[in-house]
Amino acid sequence: MPFAEKELLKLDGLRVTGQSEDSLQFLFTGKLAALNKFKKATVVYLLSQFAVPRPKALLGNQQFAQLVNDIAFVMETQIFKSFRFEAAGKDSSVFGRLAEVLAKALKLVFDPEEGELMLRVRPFAEGWEVLIRLTPRPLSARSWRICNMPGGLNASLAVIMNELARPKPNERYLNAMCGSGTLAIEQGLGSSCKALVALDIRKDALDCARENISAAKLSHIELVQADATTYQSDEPFDVITADLPWGDVVGSHKGNAQLYPAFLENMARGSSDKARLVILTHEIKLFEKLLSQDKNWKLLQSLKVSHSGHYPRIYVLKKVI
Ligand SMILES: C[S@@+](CC[C@H](N)C(=O)[O-])C[C@H]1O[C@@H](n2cnc3c(N)ncnc32)[C@H](O)[C@@H]1O
């Protein structure tokens, strides 16, 4: 959260009023559309709160008028054609009725699966709240992403990992195990580096990354098909980022027990004395055990982050010389 918070606080007229493990609550007096440009926040909602005992009460005159008013405010900034609910009990008759009357009042189609305007309804301490998503897609869903892969990284987290790696203009950057290219692309769109290389063992991953790189209109990312446990470049890298296989959607826990130590060792061999290695993984036990035995990398920072319902960690490592 400190990363998203720093980005939010750059906006005039924004004051943080509350915080949880993976969200910030704030008051904002500026133009709503200014909130759609965040790179590090995954999603931004307008919060509409009601002191009512159950969702059925949202159908009451006063509550319904407030809800329609708040949704209409969000609809002034974006074109939405349809809406949907995210809520426990969203298939109940109460939500069915709410969908019916909202569709009429807002002139939107109710599409329970693909609705663009997402309304998250949930209880809070004093009643029920509706979180109205400001954009048809989450902010982390970048327009350059035309190819996705299982296990693809959230672009907001990629921006944060790159910030933690602090690549400088005279440094060489490697995105090892790049998959669809998220880390390399966000770096390419951010600050400049002397070289930007994205590497994966699989051709289909590189084909996917190539499509995304082209959609992002970037021409300076070199794609390499190689095994990250043996690959060596002619010149060492100063910054290495990797979203390692977690052993569920991509790879296996058994395979990771071999892959992770071999990767750490090879990256130490192929990097400069000032190298930083920034890793994202959900294999927390394995990775921390390896780090406790590793002589090449020193842990500078570890951060618990939220990603698609999981809580992986980002590890920031510095080469030991
Ligand atoms: C979790 S995915 C990376 C997803 C990526 N960050 C993205 O945004 O799409 C892990 C990637 O590691 C690659 N990989 C696995 N073992 C590898 C190895 N030994 N060398 C290079 N790449 C490898 C897989 O092909 C896969 O694309």
Image (spheres, grey):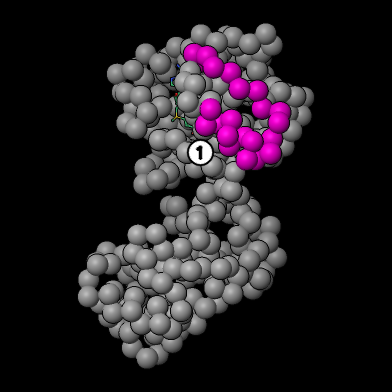
Q: Is residue 293 above or below residue 241?
A: above
Query: x, y (%) of residue 213?
Result: 62, 34
**Residue 269 in the image: x percent, y percent?**
57, 9
In the image shown, does 123 or 61 lie closer to the viewer? 61
In terms of depth relative to the viewer, which is nearer, 78 or 311?
78
Q: Residue furthest left?
A: 93
Residue in view at x 54 percent, y 72 percent: 74
Q: Which residue is mark 1?
A: 147
Q: Residues within 10 Å of mark 1 (few under 14, many from 20)?
A: some
Q: Pinpoint residue 77: horizontal percent, then vertical percent.
A: 60, 70
Q: Estimate the x, y position of residue 28 in percent, counting from the top left.
A: 61, 70
Say if residue 92 shows up in the picture. Answer: yes
Please tell me which residue is depicted at 36% across the width and 47% down the height of the picture: 309
Label 1 sits on a secondary structure element that is: loop
From the viewer's perspective, tell me whether residue 235 is left or right of residue 1. Answer: right
Residue furthest to the right in view is 170
Residue range corresponding to the magenta coloring: 207-228
Figure check: 171 above or below 261: below
For the C terminus, the quadrant is: top right
Type of amino acid under label 1 = Cys
Of the pair 295 and 88, the residue shown nearer to us: 88
Please say whether residue 68 is one of the residues in the magenta stretch: no
In the shown orientation, is residue 222 left or right of residue 225? right
Residue 297 to residue 158: above or below: above
Magenta span includes 221: yes
Q: Is mark 1 within 8 Å of ligand 1?
A: no
Q: Is residue 310 found left or right of 238 in the rendered image? A: left
